[in-house]
Image: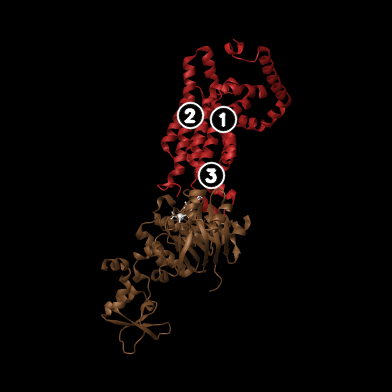
Chain colours: A red, B brown
Amino acid sequence: MPSWLTEFPQLDRTTLVELRRGLDQAYRGFSREFGAEIEAFFDPLLFFLVWFERLLINAPWWVVIIAVCALVWSLTRSWKLIVGVAIAFLLIGFFGMWEDTMSTLAIITVCTLVSIVLGVPIGILMARSNRVQMFFMPILDVMQTMPAFVYLIPVVMLLGIGKVPGVLAVVIYAIPPVIRLTNLGIRLVDREVLEAADAFGASAWQRLVRVQVPLAMPTIMAGVNQTIMMALAMVVIAAMIGVKGLGQPVLQSITNQYFTQGLLNGLAIVALAIVFDRVSQAYGKRMQQHRGSAIHG
Amino acid sequence: MADPKIRIEGLYKIFGPNPAAAIELVRQGVSKQEMLDANDHVVGLKDINLDMAGQSIQVVMGLSGSGKSTLIRHINRLIEPTAGRVLIDGQDVAQMSKDELRDFRRHQASMVFQRFALLPHRTVAQNVAFGLNIQGLDSGEVDARVARWIERIGLGGYENHYPGHLSGGMQQRVGLGRALATDADILLMDEAFSALDPLIRYDMQSVLLDLQAELNKSIVFITHDFDEALRIGDSIAILRDGEVVQQGDPQSIVLNPADDYVTDFVKGINRGKVIKVATIMRPATDDTEGPKVDGDMLLEDVARLMTREDTGWARVVGASGAVIGVVSTADVMGSMVRLANDDDTAEAAQ
Ligand SMILES: Nc1ncnc2c1ncn2[C@@H]1O[C@H](COP(=O)(O)OP(=O)(O)OP(=O)(O)O)[C@@H](O)[C@H]1O
Ligand SMILES: [Mg+2]
């Protein structure tokens, strides 16, 4: 029997090694060549992140709680939520996790903002053309199924360890829902309302900002909500590449078998997740109030 | 008649993969059904020629699928014609550049939709302001105009409500306000009242007629309801399978339906509300006594008057005030009921 029937006709070992080495070296060369420029490109982001983190950490704890509660009030008008948020933050501080929580809050906020700023326009482009949609869909599928550790590697090779690669990794992992749901929301906008916009002579831009985006808003917000949840889920993995926050004590607990420390920090992450989730949902609902029964006219 | 406000000439619309080739077949007389079966093309409109006078209400009516929506959407070119011209004050809409078309839609033609098509996230006032925002007017001007129109269409006090919280009739008032606020001369209404309950629909027809008496817009009104067509139309065009089968004023259609399709519509209606007494009068005789009625009076009103006065005859007077004819109660009654069951009685008698 020929050998290719009994054994898988695979590349021989030396070729494989060379292939890997070749690709790795090419990428390493690329990152050596351009790493500095790319890092510089992300400087403003880093600057903002550091500034925001310091702000949260340096401000007195009660100022932060009041500010967060004021924000929750302006978004949701719900006393229950405010009380819940205040209690969650007080407990977090009481158990000594204030600073880490502030770091995590900062990075999650920045990652969410970056995801929205990039994701919404991409979703809009996808909604406008089936071709663009066909181009992005497989990329999004890969982003959502590829294990996060795998794309940590090139990110770290390119940018080293630190906050910016952390943000990048989190955004890659968390951005697909905003993109998908923006695309979906805009595609679902009532055709008759769009026809009305055309009939009144709206330009493409007016149609987008006055009709499509506002009507798609509930769906887009659902995407943002999912993105925040996914970003929080990345906190521990991001800690592996040097992102400060609640993820680091968790990592520490794994190597040292500190169960309680792990649990407490885990609970703090859960508390943040619940706060973000309830607030964004209550906000979404409040935006919906006026719609009454006749949705989309 | 002066030049028509809207003139539609040789308009064809064919939906399908290759309209340009399909139109040749249609012109050679291939039927709508054959086009659909053999060629996968839907003949939406076929050789439409229609003049619509300005400052009046032109009704287009027909059954579902007859091409009414397709036709009205050609007037502001929401649908591109396959062939033909749509002239507004002599200018062909189909030839307009993108900018010209946008300007035309912003300032010259506005539209009211069957399912209202309001923006659910904007208040009544903001919805009425929509066309003005699109025009780019500054907010002071917008507010003033919106306030005026909200009063005019009877929505005072509802400025800050959201459409989702209003009844259908109220929502369509918003739709009407939005269309009127742009001061466009042409108003396109695609089954604007069809989604409303009968009583509300009647109300809205009255609102429209009141507004029209004051504003003198050029209105194209689509409906599949013949009663509605008779009530508000100054002129009616009847569509069937994408072709105009008859056009004229309401009375002429009721008196002389062009074919069975039109006869079917005419059958069920109240002729007393359409036919004018001058149409059925006999020559005047010197010795006839009786009350004087205007020649333009509708039979129903004449019948009411004659019953009240308890008289067998009435004298019909023309515009000058001179007697031009006479009618008997029997004439009036006969013309009112004759038709309702004309064919049925004829058949029953045989
Ligand atoms: N985009 C399209 N593609 C293919 N066929 C179409 C399209 N739009 C309309 N048609 C067909 O053209 C014909 C006329 O449709 P139209 O919507 O104008 O009818 P209508 O008189 O407004 O009916 P309705 O009372 O139901 O609103 C129908 O046979 C319809 O199926
Ligand atoms: Mg229609």
Q: Are marks 2 and 1 in contact (CB under 8 Å)?
A: no
Q: In the rendered structure, find residue A273 and report the number of the disc placed on it.
A: 2
Q: Residue furthest bottom?
A: B286
Q: Amino acid at mark 1?
A: Ala
Q: Amino acid at mark 3?
A: Val
Q: Position of residue B271 (x, y in %)?
A: 35, 70
Nearest to viewer (mark 3 / mark 1) = 3
Q: Amino acid at mark 2?
A: Ala
Q: Are marks 3 and 1 in contact (CB under 8 Å)?
A: no
Q: In the rendered structure, find residue A88 and report the number of the disc placed on it.
A: none
Please tell me which residue is depicted at 59% across the width and 39% down the height of the picture.
Answer: A131
Is B349 or B66 nearer to us in this picture?
B349
Quadrant for ligand 2 reads: bottom left
The residue where tag 1 is placed is: A106
Please tell me which residue is depicted at 27% across the width and 77% down the height of the picture.
Answer: B307
Q: From this viewpoint, is residue B330 visible? A: yes
Q: Position of residue A63 (x, y in %)?
A: 52, 33
The residue where tag 3 is placed is: A213
Q: Are marks 3 and 1 on the same chain?
A: yes
Is B70 or A190 nearer to us in this picture?
B70
Does the beta carbon at disc 1 come under 8 Å from ligand 1? no
Is B328 or B124 nearer to us in this picture?
B328
Q: Secondary structure at mark 1?
A: helix
